[in-house]
Image: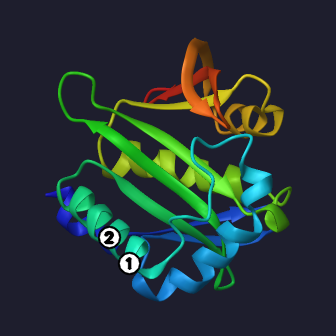
Amino acid sequence: MVGARGIHTVLKAQSAGGAIELRHPRWADFEDWAALRRESTDYLRPWEPDVSTAGLHRPAYRARLSRLKKLVQQDRAYPFYIFREGTLVGACNITHIDRGTAQSAKLGYWIGERFTGRGFARAAVKASTTFCFERLGLHRVEAAVQTDNAASIKVLKAAGFTFEGVARGMLKIDGAWRDHDIYARLSGD
């Protein structure tokens, strides 16, 4: 089963800012993760559904890790933290894996504010997409991005994703339902 092996998966990639490593979250990452999320709260608020500091405590993180471990074991999701020389810079998550007729997954990512513009997101998206196709055997990876998020659209296009349409009112972000552009990449692209 892919999921059982995936608990210890490590991906490596090269970015404009240097080599990065993607690996699953661990308990030892709590302090760095909480600090990066706290310092990037205002930066991430326009793009993410629930950007608050409410869940940045040890009990919530422990529950999160437990839930993520089960999802990996069930081959339903693969969360990755992104590191540059041992420093946490963001995350890239493969979720909503469908092993039915679709053979697909959704991809989401974020980079801490002080680490933007160095190519970390682009490298992480490419590495995660390759993992989906080559290791998980999926056919399609989809990502949703707000229609006005030019930086994220650029990341997806650079990683070979193609615009497919607009999902109206897809997510409630910062108190309002927001439209999202849907981008996807197929294993044969």
Decide if residue 9 is on the left or right side of residue 99.
Answer: right
Q: How is the image coloured?
A: rainbow
Answer whether labels 2 and 1 touch (C-beta < 8 Å): yes
Q: Secondary structure at mark 2?
A: helix
Within 10 Å of disc 1 (Cα), the crowding (few <14, some 14-19, many 20+) is: few
Within 10 Å of disc 2 (Cα), the crowding (few <14, some 14-19, many 20+) is: few
Q: Position of residue 15 (x, y in %)?
A: 74, 61
Q: Residue furthest left?
A: 1
Quarter of the view holding residue 168 = top right
Badge number at residue 59: 1
Residue 106's place in the image compared with 127, above or below, is: above
Q: Amino acid at mark 2?
A: Ala
Q: Residue at x 27, y 30 (%)?
A: 103
Q: Residue at x 75, y 63 (%)?
A: 40
Q: Residue at x 65, y 39 (%)?
A: 159
The total number of labels drawn is: 2
Residue 87's place in the image compared with 92, above or below, is: below
Q: Position of residue 34 (x, y in %)?
A: 60, 75
Viewer-side residue, 187 vs 100: 100
Viewer-side residue, 188 vs 36: 36
Decide if residue 177 is on the left or right side of residue 8.
Answer: right
**Label 2, on which residue?**
63
Quarter of the view holding residue 132 = top left
Q: Secondary structure at mark 1?
A: helix
Q: Position of residue 52 (x, y in %)?
A: 62, 57
Spatial separation of the CA atoms under disc 2 and disc 1: 6 Å
Q: Residue furthest bottom?
A: 28
